[in-house]
Amino acid sequence: MFQIIFINICILISVLFITSQVFEHVDLDANSSFSVKFIIGIIGGILGILLMYFSIHITPTIILDFRSISQIIAAIFGGIISITITGFILAIFRLFYLGLNCYSLIASITIIAVSLGYGIISKLKFNLIIKLVIMFIYSLFVRSIYFIIVLKNRELLLCTLASLWIGSIIVCGLVYLIVLYLIAAHNQLKKLKEESSKDFLTGLGNVRSFDVFFKTALNDAKTKNEKLSLLMIDIDFFKNVNDTHGHPAGDIVLKELGNLLINTCRFFDMISRIGGEEFSVILPDCSSSQALEVAERLRQAVEKHDFILSDGKIIHITISVGASTYPETVQNLDQLIQKADQALYLSKQTGRNKVSIIM
């Protein structure tokens, strides 16, 4: 028995780690796409087949295995769609694995019953641990009934049930710890990636993400023959905010300005904080006149906005904006940033709180 448990644990660990690499950049939850849930269901089915293949043969036609673990994994990470696919694969395989007979038919029905139960449990508004416990107990209950039906020898039945419960507790416990580790590792990797591409204060893109998105936007403008606009934004006299009200107040202003930019621009525009008080907005497929409209809307929104500090005091700020557009004001895409910077400098030099563009 313990040899089979060891083999099953090795299979589970291997498949779980491989799967975690396949879905390294994907969040596995109820909001995952159908294709992701379909793949999870297929992986769950393959894992269950492997666990059935390396099983304990109680009789030539009855086996004890830990396929329910693969069903739990499919239900937890893929929901009803994934567990339905996994259950269907396992039921078909078990039906013909040891020959088509009454035992395989009852086993397949048991698999379907477990899968349906898991699908319902996965929809319950409980946390992960409670769902796992309910699934675990439900599976043991249903599979115990299966063995009670198919095993007539009392001694063999008791031995089988003991093996089922003890083995399941050992395997489920280890799998639970592994899954927790993989979830923690996935979340940590996601956090590190976000921190490497997002500004820590405002949550906007940082210089790195700006460079990546800007290169993509340049390529799209060339290949699709689209217009591309860029806004460079700077807070006027931001040093005075820090000197007068303190750096925490300056942080509040930066965060709030970031929110204003997000709420004023289009959802697919790329907004970044590229310096202390400097921001940028990449406007794909946007003409010069449209870019100026967006810039002026931003300027007015900032000018009218009440920035509420932590002590309740309200202050007002203004911004200067420089704009450039390919191919209307810039014929060379490589000069788009330079032209926007020059326009921003012009705004700063001619009075601030204004939008400029150099034709």
Image (cartoon, helix red, strand yellow):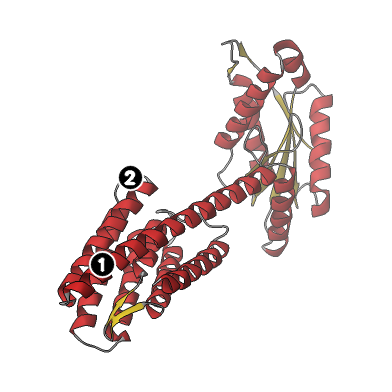
| Residue visible at 31% across and 67% down in the picture | 163
Badge 1 element: helix
Label 1 sits on what residue type? Leu
Please name whichever residue, 245 or 335, is drawn nearer the observer in this view of the structure.
Answer: 245
Q: Which element is circle 2 on?
A: loop
Q: Is residue 31 above or below residue 11?
A: above
Residue 207 position, x and y percent, is 74, 43
Residue 12 position, x and y percent, is: 47, 67
User: Which residue is at 80% across, 49% downward?
Assistant: 330
Quadrant of the snapshot with the C terminus? top right
Q: Residues within 10 Å of mark 2 (few under 14, many from 20)?
A: few
Q: Nearer the viewer, residue 255 or 248?
A: 248
Determine the CA span between mark 2 and mark 1: 29 Å
Counting residues from the start of the chain, the first of labels 2 and 1 encountered is 2
- Please identify, in this view, whether the residue under mark 2 or under mark 1 is nearer the observer: 1
Q: For residue 219, which quarter of the picture?
A: bottom right
Q: Position of residue 159 (x, y in %)?
A: 26, 70
Q: Tag 2: residue type?
A: Phe
Q: Residue at x 75, y 49 (%)?
A: 211
The quarter of the image holding the N terminus is: bottom left
Residue 330 in view: yes
Let me know if residue 109 appears in the view.
Answer: no
Q: Which mark is residue 45?
A: none
Q: Position of residue 181 (x, y in %)?
A: 53, 52
Residue beneath the point at 57% across and 59% down = 24
Report the number of discs.
Answer: 2
Left or right: where 206 falls relative to 121: right
Image-based side of 103 in relation to 75, left or right: left
Write down the residue under mark 1. Answer: 161
Identify residue for label 2: 126
